[in-house]
Image (cartoon, rainbow, N blue to C red):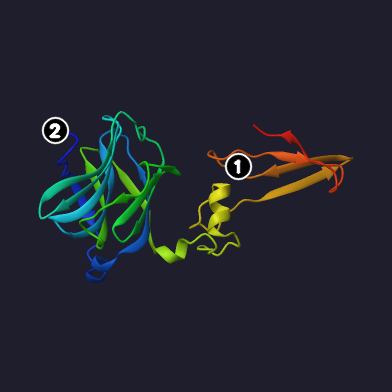
């Protein structure tokens, strides 16, 4: 069956202390010209014990598995739902809190809710592919879970993590934050802002702060 026991090829962060990681957020950017399996490993202890998030465009697969003592268990599996297209810029984020995992791709949840690993609760991270030629992994980042709490400012750009989420900006990039500006001459005013592809922006107007606002620009 091409949906299970997909061992593929992977590399992992070989650091003894990383095998104790249990609460963190793992982010990686992925791009591939192919349409086969790509993903990440977490809770990796050795070749026979780890968890995996697996995405496959050709088969419409998005899945999470646990391998324990060499035996594979399905944690979550959805088919006929293409998670990506070849040559797309992908941002995969996995939030790990002990034996509970949540994953998103380009800001959208991969599964219906948190996935319980049940069998493992700590381990290092890795990068994975299955038959996907030319895959590129970049901007790999692992941070402690408490560093990405909503009121924290992980990248120090003056915007909280919650504000960056609402704006669709990158909480790990100090140069990426929502900004807008107003320009005017001869009685004409222009309002501009930096847009992102996964957010809708509106302009509301009122003659005075005590009056009702109306939408004058937006999708």
Q: Position of residue 142 (x, y in %)?
A: 37, 61
Q: Nearer the viewer, mark 1 or mark 2?
A: 2
Q: Quarter of the image holding residue 64?
A: top left
In three-dimensional space, the C-alpha distance between marks 1 and 2, rounded to whole angstroms, equals 43 Å
Q: Is residue 107 above or below residue 125?
A: above
Q: On residue 195, which mark appears?
A: 1
Classify 10 Å Cα crowding around label 2: few (below 14), some (14-19), many (20 and above).
few
Nearer the N terminus, badge 1 or badge 2? 2
Q: Are marks 1 and 2 in contact (CB under 8 Å)?
A: no
The residue closer to the viewer here, 44 or 109, is: 109
Q: Quarter of the image holding residue 188?
A: top right
Q: Quadrant of the C terminus?
A: top right
Q: Position of residue 214 (x, y in %)?
A: 77, 37
Q: On residue 210, which mark appears?
A: none
Residue picked out by circle 2: 1
Query: Image check: 89 left or right of 205?
Result: left
Report whether residue 176 is seen. no
Name the residue at the left extreme: 70
Q: Secondary structure at mark 2?
A: loop
Residue at 17% in and 46% down: 73
Residue at 53% in and 58% down: 161
Report whether residue 155 is seen. yes
Total tally of numbered discs in the picture: 2
Query: Image check: 209 left or right of 55?
Result: right
Name the residue at the bottom extreme: 17
Q: Secondary structure at mark 1?
A: loop
Q: Quarter of the image holding residue 1?
A: top left
Query: Image check: 215 left or right of 116?
Result: right
């Amino acid at each position: 069956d091409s949906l299970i026991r997909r061992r593929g090829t992977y590399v992992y962060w070989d650091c003894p202390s990383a095998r104790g990681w249990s609460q963190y957020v793992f982010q990686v950017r992925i791009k591939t010209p192919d349409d086969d399996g790509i993903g990440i490993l977490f809770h990796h202890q050795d070749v026979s014990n780890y968890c995996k998030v697996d995405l496959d465009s050709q088969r419409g697969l998005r899945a999470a598995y646990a391998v324990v003592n060499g035996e594979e268990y399905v944690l979550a599996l959805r088919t006929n739902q293409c998670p990506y297209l070849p040559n797309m810029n992908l941002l995969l984020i996995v939030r790990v809190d002990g034996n509970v995992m949540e994953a998103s791709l380009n800001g959208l949840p991969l599964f219906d809710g948190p996935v319980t690993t049940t069998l493992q609760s700590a381990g290092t991270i890795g990068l994975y592919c299955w038959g996907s030629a030319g895959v590129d992994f970049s901007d790999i980042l692992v941070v402690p879970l408490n560093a990405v709490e909503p009121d924290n400012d992980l990248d120090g750009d003056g915007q909280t993590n919650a504000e960056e989420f609402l704006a669709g900006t990158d909480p790990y990039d100090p140069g990426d934050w929502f900004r807008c500006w107003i320009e005017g001459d001869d009685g004409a005013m222009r309002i501009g802002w930096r847009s992102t592809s996964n957010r809708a922006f509106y302009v509301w107007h009122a003659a005075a702060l005590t009056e009702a606002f109306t939408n004058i620009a937006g999708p």
